[in-house]
Amino acid sequence: MAIRDILIVPDPRLKQISKPVERVDDDLRGLMDDMLETMYDAPGIGLAAVQVGVPQRVIVMDISPREGEPEPRYFVNPEILWRSEETEPYEEGCLSVPDIYDEVERPARVKLRYLNYQGETIEEDAEGVFAVCIQHEMDHLDGVLFIDHLSRLKRDRAVSKVKKAAKAA
């Protein structure tokens, strides 16, 4: 396993549309293992492959409490089958937009289908942090960042802050 570099805004690769994965094999599992190690190191609770420069429809996630046992999750070619009409605001952040947090309104519940680490098809319902996180990460697969859900002013300010911090580092 290896820790990979996480792309930071305004890197244009973050705007790429990720390609579907043909099959879950050892190479893909190696990528997912690297992504998980990268996410834990950052630290974060979710990471899309495009954030490490691999434009494939792959997500890793762990929303378990920090002090508990890790509960890694793997999502290959995830798709949302249903969204609730009810929405909820949630303060989001992103490893590709460091130190920026803002409220985003998303469907409160979703039903999704994906392939797991073994390549098995799974369908499940998500709500709460799980629903927020999977929608946030799936946005990445379509070249959308959480700041794209904000006003133009807030988005521009966020990108400026990240650029300024990068220059100072």
Image (cartoon, grey):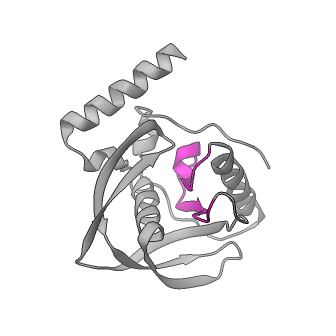
Q: Which residue is nearer to you in this view: 1 or 66?
A: 66
Q: Is residue 10 above or below residue 128?
A: above
Q: Is residue 119 left or right of residue 53?
A: right
Q: Is residue 74 above or below residue 92?
A: below
Q: x%, y% of residue 137?
A: 46, 58
Q: Which residue is nearer to you in this view: 155 or 5?
A: 155
Residue at left 39%, top 44%? 15
Residue extending farthest to the top is 168
The mark tally for this picture is: 0
In the image, is residue 64 part of the stretch drawn in magenta?
yes
Residue at left 68%, top 55%? 36
Q: Is residue 49 left or right of residue 26?
A: left
Residue at left 30%, top 51%? 103
The C terminus lies in quadrant: top right
For the record, the magenta segment spans 43-65
State which quadrant residue 115 falls in. bottom right
Q: x%, y% of residue 146?
A: 35, 49
Residue at left 80%, top 50%? 1
State which quadrant residue 86 falls in. bottom left
Q: x%, y% of residue 131?
A: 42, 70
